Amino acid sequence: MLIRPLAPADYLPTLDAMRAFTAARDDGTPDEIWLVEHPAVFTQGLAGKPEHVLTPGEIPVIRTERGGQVTYHGPGQVVAYTLIDLRRRRLMVRDLVCRLEAAAIETCAAWGVRAVRSPGAPGLYLAAAEGTAGPKLASLGLKVSRGCSYHGIALNVAMDLEPFERINPCGYAGLQVTDLARARDGAPTADRVDPPDPAAVARRFGEALAAHIERP
């Protein structure tokens, strides 16, 4: 599996490249993970409701074919696009979702942050004191075409969170959002490994994603 290292990339050209890659691939095309950092952009899922976009201001809103509602991408967030042949790997979509979430949980743990799933709500959340889901750390949305996935998972690392206040994140009014930098502020000092630099997080995240996707 090819892991493309973190690089800045505008959203629309990246979306076009994912579509072209998926349309052109054949049974022998290797799977790839693209790690990118986008300029500020809101993206709407296929069934996204316009009322969840509150006050976008100068930030563009782009409709896509992925699942889910509206989310925000911006500097300081690592987006991992997972271009995977599910048929070849004999994976169901739910299998892939679970593996992406597991890789994100593992990556957060490497920076001393405990992330958890929330039943019925894909993505990852900061674990509250009682182990329940607190503010959201990572959002997830996929598209499958001819048995192959694209789009992926976005992990908030060290970013300006204000734009999330301009939307109902993932369609949930009042949903709190956080990132690794803020989550680590509440972690015990002994759990702190190194600062949550997006490039370092991206390397660890890419390796974890590949390992979880490739496991039997």
Image (cartoon, rainbow, N blue to C red):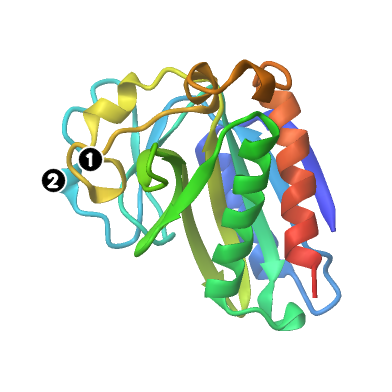
Q: What residue appears at the point 67 percent right and 16 percent down from the top-left corner? A: 195
Q: Could you tell which of marks 2 and 1 lies nearer the N-terminus?
A: 2
Estimate the x, y position of residue 95 in percent, counting from the top left: 59, 73
The spot of residue 140 in percent (x, y) is 48, 52
Callout 1: 10 Å neighbours few (<14), some, many (20+)? some
Please say if 58 is above or below 108: above
Tell me the amino acid under the disc marked 2: Glu
Gap between marks 2 and 1, in whole Å? Answer: 8 Å
Quadrant occupied by the N terminus: bottom right
Q: Which residue is mark 2?
A: 51
| Element on which disc 2 rests | helix
User: As drawn, is 31 to the left or to the right of 183?
Assistant: right
The percent coordinates of residue 91 (x first, y second) are: 66, 79
Does residue 35 appear left or right of residue 3 in this picture? left
Residue 106 is tagged as none
| Residue linked to disc 1 | 168
**Residues at circles 2 and 1 in contact by the CB criterion of under 8 Å:** yes
Q: Residue 115: x percent and y percent?
A: 52, 43
User: What type is the residue that disc 1 sits on?
Assistant: Asn
User: Nearer the observer, disc 2 or disc 1?
Assistant: 1
- Residue 76 shown left or right of residue 121 in the figure: right
Residue at image location 80% in from the left, 57% down from the top: 211
Q: In which quadrant will I find the C terminus?
A: bottom right
Q: Is residue 43 visible?
A: no
Q: Is residue 18 above or below residue 204?
A: below
Do we see residue 80 in this rendering? yes
